[in-house]
Image: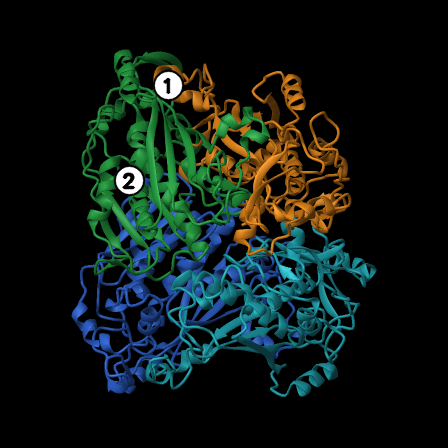
Chain colours: A green, B orange, C cyan, D blue
């Protein structure tokens, strides 16, 4: 349930305020040269505290390789990477234990796991789990030298001017949502299958695994619902499959068509808003006003592009292994 | 690659103009009483030719049970259902073989499968494959007597007045897209997992398996990206988890929270538009103008609600089996 | 639960006395030329009635292709094959319904599926389901032109002289067990993984799916338990990995080593013996003497070699696809 | 490829002389109380150096919990357990790098992974990886309070008197193989499926994941091949399914029948024998005589019973979760 992928397969584990979070990557081809420097830049992008609008909590996020790498290369066996939790302030969270935080998984986790869940800082639900995913994405990117994957925030709080959107939230003393767009170039034709293993299906599955994502659209997406067929259809121009327009976003019938892969996702505002809220108190069984302390992101979308790139790389590397576009031993 | 599900697991097969399309359902609990009448209404809804805007091609769509049902009950073994193809006009399609139809999978299929694919009427890519999915959905619905799933078209061609949207397309002699909304009531709390098996992830995977779907959003969806946290958060009101608002659409942390599950999806306009188009001719290697003959839907979204309900039921029944909310023998 | 394989994946369905038995093969490469003649010889070997010691029931066992083959080639999409049930005598079986037959699944099926199972002729448990497996095996064999797979009965009733073993059973008016050995040549080095996906693990999983198999051993097998290490170790002779002896049976560390793959399996005597037996009567809740009517195999091992070859081919083709030794489009 | 199980799912990682070996258990029900003391006894049994015939290498084998346990209970999320490698002498092994050790995976690993594998002490192929499996087995046993699983060595070097068998090997200055038998009592009727998920299939898959196992048989096993049907059939005696004999070893049609589950497995002699051997030298491309230094087991079968119990428990707990005989939250 915490695993994803067919050949290039990841499994995540850990809790926000436990000993560590981590990931195991199975099925990565042998012989991939790598140094921590290949992974650190992406991990750095995921970290908060560097940009306006992200949490000042700064874990070191240093990847500790426990297996699967030998003499600076992947061995072909499972690669387990840990990220130790050092900079945690659990006391901040335990105070709010009696009020399940709105927008967070506190309430559902408690119901589903019978109160056995590690609730501190969101536990296993914490976005900190994405550190491992970003590391795995860095491996996947290295497997696809000719493919470029670029995600960026295109909108914050409804403003295409990111700074303006953030300022709006700062002024309102509130958190705010955003839109991320991802573009992939250099993909071979023929990745993906019709139906359940379509590029859209598999990408959407993992994109919705990113905390706070509420919507995904490919190519023209929701706007396509308002179009005529003659407008939306992309006219094929040559034997390479290059199309005049790219309303399809690079995927037709679930399969990559050689044009740029384009998709967008909606990220909800950070649930931990500085504003006072009203919700249920488990102890009194009454609703009450409360406010959330702690260090939080003003807009979680800001840290998400590197995660979006990572999950995209993971999906595409897996498809490329299945289609024999990446070798099992490099 | 043509299978989906963990315990309640479906596998589809067949081609639009081959002998049949069909499905195998594995993992359906034993002892479910059923008659064809339990399945026919949903199959009827999927069929074209009844409503304005759908194709006049009317297969009988009669489900032929080949296994897994005995004495009017499921046996607990794989249920294979066939739908024979009778009313096909392959000659309509073979004429266009030299021009891969824009918006269709003709070009990618040819590249991916080396020209071995059955291209007639879209072959395995045809929406006719959804007949089996609708049948499986009918089984899944019967397994969840207390859950109601209702999908409907809420917009055609940008118009919330469906008739008006269709008339716009008829006037333009073009096809048109639409929006479908699905609402589920009666779900227990606790279905789904964080990350890859979140309700959103698994539902999105199968929803994107429906031909022509281009976007999916849960709860407030893309609009959430424009909201403040204090607006979007749903205040929990009582010990049953009932929230004051339902911006989350019934899913928090990937897990059902007992409120109404709500999601929407964008359907692109039918690729086979009556309008003249321009695209590549494989033989001449030049682009040329052409038009598509045959019987087609003006708006494929119109036939899709029952398919959306079916895939939703399939996902939820699988989660309920995993969570032991449905017994293995009824 | 009725599926097997990672890339080349089979799913079986059907009942002995229902409409049909069948199989769906997903993940078979596109472009494999085939005619029924490529499959019929193996199906013929599986059939009874031809050799001494096999049941006189002779289904036609004619494979009806319902999907996935077009213009005499595989399309790359799921291949569904049906075998209709024509020559059934259900009345033979219904008589014994009140006594669960010893050695058969009657009793466990009834308990597990709450009496909903199709009990006629063993229903889904019937060895008739192996018809589909044999067909899938024929496809797998065709994918591996350079690999030869040969299984044969080496012992019946403890006699290496098959005729003698059968005569012993005929004289005793009883059924009898046997040993089958399978040898594979031409395998590349490097198939299989350590642990759960070792060649032994995956082969054993599917070999035990063959009804009546009670034991599997690789290379020297059980005899290895009596040996010294210096005797059992196979000395590597050259850079191709050729070993002086082959006690390992071609698999070391779960991985093929380029030597002949050798394994053996034990088949229990046919449960339906002509002899009078004693067992429980469900109606009276007392044990009683009874005898089984109907047409049965004296020794089911005799029909099994082609099934053993089929499952071996299925496993190896899947490993070869995973290792990119077989292309996705031929 | 290094994962096993459907609901209770394990994933192993690590190398013999790397930083650690470990396991992740996903799908373990929430609310299982545990202390290290519940796991240590089984880990102790797996360790060498305590009994005659086992290696004097004594890792501490102390399980370090990294996730999934909180306040002394399982949380329902992935449980990752590490075993640090402390007591390694890699120099012993590096000396033999030029000669792939017969019976070991050195040669196949080198071929399959292109020389990128961590070869020290067998790397990922090392039996040390079974430490994690034993830990997972301890969890699985705790989930099934009413089920008793007992494996023991019944034969060493062909002698049912274990001491005598070991002395034979000591006298010969050689390693030796053995037989292990496992018996399970208290199982409910109805676990397992016909075909690929039969109890025999799934158990055999994981039993062959144990290094050095060369054969598996259920119930009467290979001896069944020499029997008549009337001898082998187990007469059902009462409505609980109790049989007069137990030739089936508790499994009929792939499904547990309520009688004692019995299976045996053959373990080859330790490949690292103290005797001088002859094999290929990669550098000279010639065969040569050599001997293996280092600390090794005289008979690896001696340490294996607790591993056999562990894999059996893992399989059965998974089946019991699937059949809803174990709850998701305890």
Is D242 left, or right, of D4 in this rendering? Answer: right
Look at discs 2 and 1 and give the one toward the viewer. Answer: 1
Real-space Cα distance between discs 2 and 1? 27 Å
Residue B60 at what x, y percent from top left?
77, 39
Where is residue B28? Give x, y as percent.
Answer: 62, 44
Look at 74% across and 31% down and name the residue there. Answer: B49
Q: Quadrant of residue D258?
A: bottom right
Residue at horizontal 69 percent and vertical 27 percent from the top: B53
Q: Which mark is residue D269?
A: none
Q: Secondary structure at mark 1?
A: loop
How busy is the neighbourhood of tag 2: few (under 14 within 10 Å), some, or many (20 plus)? Answer: many
Q: Which mark is residue A131?
A: 2
Location of residue C4 with respect to D159 vertically, above or below? above
Q: Is residue C54 above or below residue C120?
A: below
Q: Residues within 10 Å of mark 1 (few under 14, many from 20)?
A: some
Left or right: D277, with B1 as reference point: left
What residue did someone put label 1 on?
A158
Residue that appears at 78% across and 69% down: C57
The x and y percentages for residue C70 are 66, 57
Q: Chain of mark 1?
A: A
**Mark count:** 2
């Amino acid at each position: 349930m915490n695993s994803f992928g067919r050949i290039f397969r990841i499994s995540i584990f850990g809790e926000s305020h436990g000993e560590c979070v981590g990931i195991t990557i199975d099925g990565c081809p042998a012989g991939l040269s790598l140094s921590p420097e290949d992974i650190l830049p992406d991990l750095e992008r995921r970290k908060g505290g560097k940009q306006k609008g992200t949490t000042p909590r700064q874990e070191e996020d240093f990847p500790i390789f426990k297996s699967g790498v030998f003499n600076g290369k992947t061995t072909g066996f499972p690669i387990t990477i840990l990220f130790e939790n050092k900079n945690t302030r659990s006391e901040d969270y335990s105070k709010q234990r009696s009020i399940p935080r709105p927008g967070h998984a506190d309430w559902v986790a408690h119901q589903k796991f019978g109160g056995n869940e590690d609730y501190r800082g969101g536990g296993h639900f914490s976005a900190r789990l994405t550190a491992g995913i970003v590391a795995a994405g860095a491996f996947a990117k290295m497997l696809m030298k000719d493919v470029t994957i670029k995600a960026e925030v295109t909108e914050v709080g409804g403003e295409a001017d990111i700074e303006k959107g953030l300022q709006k939230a700062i002024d309102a003393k509130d958190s705010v949502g955003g839109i991320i767009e991802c573009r992939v170039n250099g993909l071979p034709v023929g990745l993906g299958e019709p139906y359940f293993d379509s590029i859209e299906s598999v990408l959407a599955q993992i994109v919705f695994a990113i905390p706070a994502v509420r919507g995904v659209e490919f190519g023209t997406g929701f706007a396509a619902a308002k179009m005529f067929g003659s407008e939306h259809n992309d006219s094929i121009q040559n034997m390479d499959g290059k199309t005049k327009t790219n309303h399809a976003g690079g995927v037709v019938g679930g399969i990559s068509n050689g044009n740029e892969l384009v998709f967008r996702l909606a990220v909800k505002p950070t649930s931990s808003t500085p504003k006072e809220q009203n919700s249920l108190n488990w102890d009194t069984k009454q609703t009450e006003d409360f406010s959330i302390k702690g260090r939080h992101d003003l807009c979680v979308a800001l840290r998400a592009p590197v995660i979006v790139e990572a999950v995209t790389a993971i999906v595409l590397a897996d498809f490329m292994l299945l289609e024999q576009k990446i070798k099992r031993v490099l």
